[in-house]
Amino acid sequence: MRHLRLAFALTALAALPAAAQDRFAMPVTAQVLHGWVQADGSRMAAVHMDLEAGWKTYWRAPGDAGIPPSFDWRGSRNLHSVAISWPRPDVFDENGMRSIGYSERLVIPLSITPKEAGSPVHVRLSMDIGICADICIPHRLEFDEVIATDETRPTPAIAAALADGPYSAAEAGVTSARCTIEPTAEGLRIEARVGVPHTGGTEVMVIESGLPDIWVSESDTRRSGDEVIAVSEMIHVNGGPIALDRSAIRLTVLGSNHAVDVRGCSAG
C-alpha cells in the first residue's frame, strides 16, 4: 500500500503541466566538482548537491518511502567506466515510514576511468533523483562537463565525502556474515546475520539483492549480542522466480557512529 501511495503521488506530480512545474522553484541546486587526477590515471570528480532546509534526497537503496536515484551516462566521450562512492546516509523515520538518504548537502564522489588516459573526459550525465519534504518530487539533473584538470591534490569536499563512506568488513572487524534464505508464497524471505562491533545508536541493516527488478522490503533489524540481525522479503517486480547469488548480496549496517559495507554472505 505504501508503494501505491508513493507511486500515485509521483505520477500526479510528473503529470503537472510544464507551466506549473516552471513556477515551482526546485529546492535543490547541483554542480560537478572536477576533482583531481589519481595515480592510476583515473579522474576523481563528484556531484555536489545543496538542498533547502527541510528537504532531502535519497541513497542508492532508499527504503520503502524513498525514490532511488539513477544515472545515465549516454553521450559521454572518452568515458570507459564510473565507480560511484556513496557517503554514509541518514535514516529518516516519519509517520511510520522509513527512508534512507541525505539532507542539506550531498557530495557523491565519482571515480572516472577514461578510455584514453591523460585526455579530457566529456561527461554527459542525466541523473534522476527524488527530493522530498511534505511532498515528494521527481527531478532530473543534467550535466554537460569537460573534465580536463591536471590537478593531483585532492579536493577537500570530495576527500571528506570519501572519508565519510562506510567501513569495509575488514576495517570494521566483521567476524561473520550469514544469510538464511527461504521461499515464500510471493518470493523469498532472507535473514541476514552480521557479526560486528556496535556501530552506534539504533542500528539499521539494509539488504540489497544484487539483482535488477527485485524489490527488497524494509528490514526488521535488531542486535543480539555480537550480531546485527535483519529480516526482509524479496519479490520479483514481474512476478518471476528469484535466483540469488550469495556473493552479490550486499549488507550495509547503518549506525550513528559509522556504517559498515559487507559484500556477500555465507549460508546461514
Image (cartoon, rainbow, N blue to C red):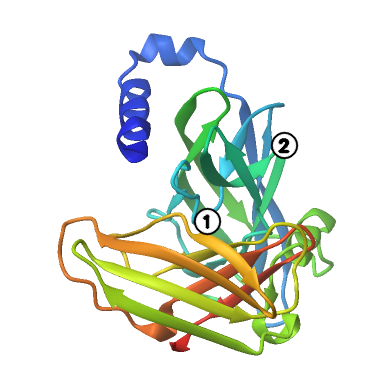
Q: Quadrant of the N terminus?
A: top left
Label 1 crowd (10 A; few <14 / some 14-19 / many >=20): some
Q: Quadrant of the C terminus?
A: bottom left
Q: Position of residue 111 (x, y in %)?
A: 61, 68
Is 127 situated above or below 115? Answer: above
- Reading the chain from its start, which is encountered first: label 1 or label 2? 2
Callout 2 amino acid: Glu
> Observer-nearest residue: 61 or 22?
61
Residue 127 in the figure: left or right of residue 169: left
Residue 212 pos. (x, y %): 31, 64
User: Cβ–Cβ below 8 Å for labels 1 and 2?
Assistant: no
Q: Which residue is mark 2?
A: 104
Residue 153 - label? none
Q: Residue at x 59, y 88 (%)?
A: 176
Disc 1, SS:
strand
User: Picture coordinates of residue 16 (x, y %)?
Assistant: 34, 16
Q: Residue at the location (43% across, 55% down)? A: 73
Q: Secondary structure at mark 2?
A: loop
Q: CA distance from mark 1 to mark 2?
A: 28 Å
Of residues 66 and 17, the one nearer the viewer is 66
Q: State which quadrant residue 237 falls in.
A: bottom left
Residue 79 seen: no
Dot 2 alpha-carbon crowd within 10 angstroms: few under 14, some 14 to 19, many 20 or more: some
Residue closer to the observer: 210 or 35: 210
Q: Is 138 situated above or below 221? A: above
The amino acid on which the numbered mark 1 sits, given as a three-letter code, is: His
Of labels 1 and 2, the one closer to you: 2
Q: Quarter-wise, where is residue 215 in the image?
A: bottom left
Q: Is residue 210 above or below residue 136?
A: below
| Residue that carries the numbered disc 1 in the rendered image | 122
